[in-house]
Amino acid sequence: MTRFFEVTNRDGPARLGRLRLDDAIETPAIITKDEIAFAGPIWGFSSIEDALKAGESLSGKTDKIVIGPHVAVPFHIEPPFSVPATPTDGPSGFVVHPLLRKVPPASDVRVVGAAGSLHNPRELVAAILKIRRMKPPDSALYTPALATPANLALLIYLGVDLVDGTRVVVDGLLGRYHLRDGVWPIEELKKLPCRCSFCRAMEGGGRDPKMIAEHNLLKLEEELLIVQEMIRAGTIREYVERQVRVTPEQTTALRLLDQEHEYLEQRTPVSRRSTMYANCAESLTRVEVTRFARRVLERYRAPDGDVLLLLPCSARKPYSTSRSHRLFAMALGETRRRLHELVITSPLALVPRELEEVYPAASYDVPVTGRWDREERAWILSCLDAYLERNTRQRVVAHLEGELREMLEEHGIDAVYTGGGTDGDSLARLKEAAVEATRDARRLEGYPIQRFRALADYHFGRDASSALLTGDVRVRGRELQSADREALAALTPNGTIALSIEGAKRLLSLGGYIVEIGDFLPRGDVLAPGVTDADDQIRPGDEVIVMGEAAFGVGKARMSGWEMVESTRGIAVELRHVEKT
């Protein structure tokens, strides 16, 4: 059980939190010896009993993280035995060696044993993920003697909450000069590329090792502030993708982390306020991309019609607000009522028109060159094949040009290709093809209803639309209503659905996105200790149904479903509506 650490915000594995000492520490943070009471390794004592007594002597401290004695061994050696946790009235810490097989006791802080030896990217990723997967999930993770300005963002994105300045201080005393772009022997620098007070003081004189150490620590502190802001803004992934280019080892670590898809997906919110920048090859494998594509292919059902129109993406999002897509709409005219529009794009692959307001489709950007590399081609074509297999159409019109058109033609996609473009001739070809393709096609359901159906399935599962839109329903503005004008759900600005109490009751039979709580009526947000069970597929930002013996409500998840059940602190659900049962 964790009593003194609480996670307050999440952006993938990276977290903002609060460690409650006498002076609270906002995490991620750089801690010093002033915040730690450490008994040390057992090898420093004449016996295990003496080591345990040393730990017990620290138990009364409440203003420090109390870390009892531990079995210190090198990274590649499994500890021969473990030492019990030191009981304390304050924040507790426990050293966990990455090769330890026994589940460690719950503590506010887990210290990664032999962390300073984690230079190999495969070992680094494996060690941190192993310890972060241990219960409870709301313990802070501390990696001593490992952080530098260059690797700090990666460490935090892996799941580290606490670091220290040991490595950069020691490096400074040895003449190693750190920046966020790497480390250099100080003697190789003709001029110091920093204007901090320590570097200015070294301009006219010798390169004082103590000043180098102070400079290094300052750079680490500055990098921490940047990382904290990136998490708050929901852009830590973009920042990490840039920062790992400092060394091949860091790039390798990120690619290895992306292979741990379950670990990332379980911790990544379903939406962010920021724009998702897909600037590099690693962007194709990030969770936001693969999750969106999977939901389109597995949950989404295209409108029941006869004609599919393939369109290119646009720089402006949502697409329908762009000049090109407005021109497409004008050219299509009344034929839009008889065809379904699907946007082909990188890195998301396929974006149905009804889902263009969903994150990340509504807020992403990608470098546009007109060229499609091998990975992009394989990804888009595999998704398109799966989509066409699940959503068959008699006719396909493709208003695409350049390599995108060539890619589909070479792959054997049977379509009427109109050449793409927004000039007069191109739009005329689009109109002519659409009129011909829809001549005897069925008329589709109204777009507002189509959109609610698509969003219901996308957010709650493939059969959710049948349950939510059962009977005589209608759309007024951005609200879905029953025949007697009772609100069922509303569209939010970020493309999600906000349920009413009545709308939530319609989805109960599906059994998904439900948070079960104890026998009480919440007066505010639902805290993790009040949760008795939760759907594993719930992610931060999901709309959820809250139910218990005394209450029924709806709200937004602040943590994943598995975290709600296993955590001992923190807000599980921000309640919007609740009623007594």
Image: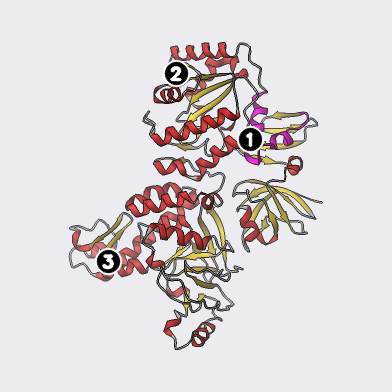
Q: What kind of element bears circle 1?
A: helix
Q: Quick check: marks 3 and 1 in contact, CB under 8 Å?
A: no
Name the disc covering residue 212, or none.
Answer: 3
Q: Residues within 10 Å of mark 2 (few under 14, many from 20)?
A: some
Main SS category, magenta section:
helix
Q: Quadrant of residue 445?
A: top right
Query: Does 459 appear above or below 210?
Result: above
The residue under the point 61% across, 57% down is: 563
Question: Which of the numbered marks, if any, corresponds to residue 422?
Answer: 2
| Magenta segment boundaries in residue numbering | 445-472
- What residue is pinned by disc 1? 455
Q: Nearer the viewer, mark 3 or mark 1?
A: 1
Residue kind at label 2, given as amino acid type: Thr
* Disc 1 residue type (three-letter): Leu
Mark 2–mark 1 Cα distance, whole angstroms, equals 29 Å
Q: Nearer the viewer, mark 3 or mark 2?
A: 2
